[in-house]
Image (cartoon, helix red, strand yellow):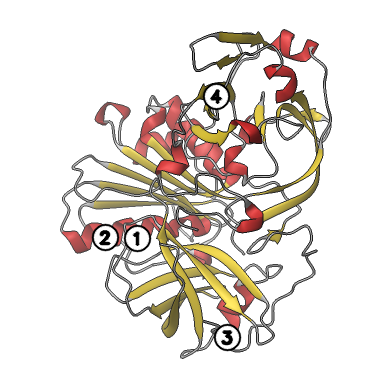
Amino acid sequence: MNLITRGFHGRRGGDPTRIPPGQYETHDFPVLTVGPTPRVDTDTWTFTITTETGARHTWTWEQLLALPQESPHTDIHCVTRWSKLDTDWTGVSLDTLLEDVETTAEYALAHSHGGYTTDLPLQDLTDGQAWIAHTFDGHPLDPEHGGPARLLVPHLYFWKSAKWISGLTLLDEDEPGFWEQAGYHDYGDPWREQRYRGD
Amino acid sequence: MARWTPATLEADRWETPTARTLVLSVPGWTGHRPGQHVDVRLRAEDGYTAERSYSIASASAPDRLELTVQLDPDGEVSPYLVGDFAVGDRVEVRGPLGGWFVWDTTAPDPVVLIGGGSGIVPLMAMVRERHRTGSRALFRLLYSLRTPEDRYYRTELGPAADPGVDVFVAYTRTAPPGSARGPERLSVADLNTHGFPAEFAPVCFVCGPTGFVETAADGLLALGHAPDRIRTERYGAGGRR
């Protein structure tokens, strides 16, 4: 069906090689959160990877900062339709964190302070595709944007980049997270416009 | 859920000089839950499309829904929907979408609604759905806006419109002449006075610009409301244009 909206012309101007279908570019940094912003203290902050066998690997804030740091420069895409280009982050690659983790799991469920969860295939977190990010545009990440640290998985819709990250549980079977249970897509590829279940 | 459906503008109402309610005829629409939104798609003659999400303003009804669109002069879609979209013109919609920022009409719990600016829209859907379903849940609505001219839904949210829905309006820039409260931001004291006490364990819905929602949600936490009783929806700058 190609229904025309009479008199609509649009403003356009977005680069179609960088703005996925149904998105528009914003220069702000909007916030999407389901409840109050948790304030997480770096003195007590930890990040824990729990494998499918129950083995736990935990890092404190100091330990995270002592690991090799990377500075991804990337575009991000929110399912609420904004895309933000050329963002700069600093954080630790999941490749580094998973280096000594023995696993054959296929999926990961990310957990946040405040109770939020989101699920991803483990292979989307490796090979330089995902970070635990603590710095945005040269400044410590604001609490409203997920500080002190959030997951950063820029090739998927941004709800997969869990704010206030507290850990990952590695799983043999996929387990839907918060938005996924509420009808959003299990994978969330912006270039295939996988917004809602069934897209 | 994923299907796009034609929607025809049947009528409109101006809420303010820059906010217009669109009454859309959507054959096949089976209703929605209060607080949900729809995706709207506009297609130009050459095939270019733009999509945006808008909160639904109306109570659930078959084949019909209402959106209230605030003009953002720098936006791409709202200038068309507010200024050019004429009765008989068509867009496509899909939905209803969103399962979290939704009021459960069967729940007896008291409800606190806190809206900033155009964040009143999904809260209005809750007030209207309460009326439609005959719910006896007690509502307290706190509506923050800059000036009296910016006020949406004046009659429906007017004085004593419904004894089960208390409405408090906080003007932040210009208060009406003679009002006891000067223009000031919605404060923790306002939340305390015009909301429900935390002991009543109300469910709280907060919607508006990011900064407003952050402040109001933090205020509710400070008053002892449990984080899992506070549901938020933020319209970031550049959010719904």
The location of residue B160, given as percent across then percent down, is: 25, 59
Q: CA distance from mark 2 to mark 4?
A: 45 Å
Depth order, front residue of A141/B1:
B1
The location of residue B82, given as percent across then percent down, is: 56, 77
Which amino acid does the dot numbered 3 rest on? Answer: Ile
Q: Quadrant of residue A15?
A: bottom right
Name which of mark 4 and mark 3 comes first in the sequence: 3
Q: Secondary structure at mark 1?
A: helix
Closer to viewer: mark 3 or mark 2: 3
Which amino acid does the dot numbered 1 rest on? Answer: Ala
Label 4 marks which chain's residue?
A: A
Depth order, front residue of A46/B19:
A46
The location of residue A109, given as percent across then percent down, is: 51, 28
Q: Is residue B15 visible?
A: no
Q: Which mark is residue A24?
A: none
Depth order, front residue of B146/A38:
A38
- Residue indicated by mark 1: B125
Given contact means CB atoms under 8 Å apart, are the residues at marks 2 and 4 in contact? no
Which amino acid does the dot numbered 4 rest on? Answer: Ala
Closer to viewer: mark 2 or mark 4: 4
Given contact means CB atoms under 8 Å apart, are the residues at marks 1 and 2 in contact? yes
- Residue indicated by mark 3: A4
- Residue indicated by mark 4: A105
- Residue indicated by mark 2: B129
Q: Is residue B205 visible?
A: yes
The location of residue B235, given as percent across then percent down, is: 56, 52
Given contact means CB atoms under 8 Å apart, are the residues at marks 4 and 1 in contact? no
Q: Secondary structure at mark 2?
A: helix
Tell if the residue under mark 1 belongs to the same chain as the one under mark 2. Answer: yes
Which amino acid does the dot numbered 2 rest on? Answer: Glu
Q: Residue sitting at 59 percent across and 89 percent down?
A: A6
Q: CA distance from mark 3 to mark 1?
A: 29 Å
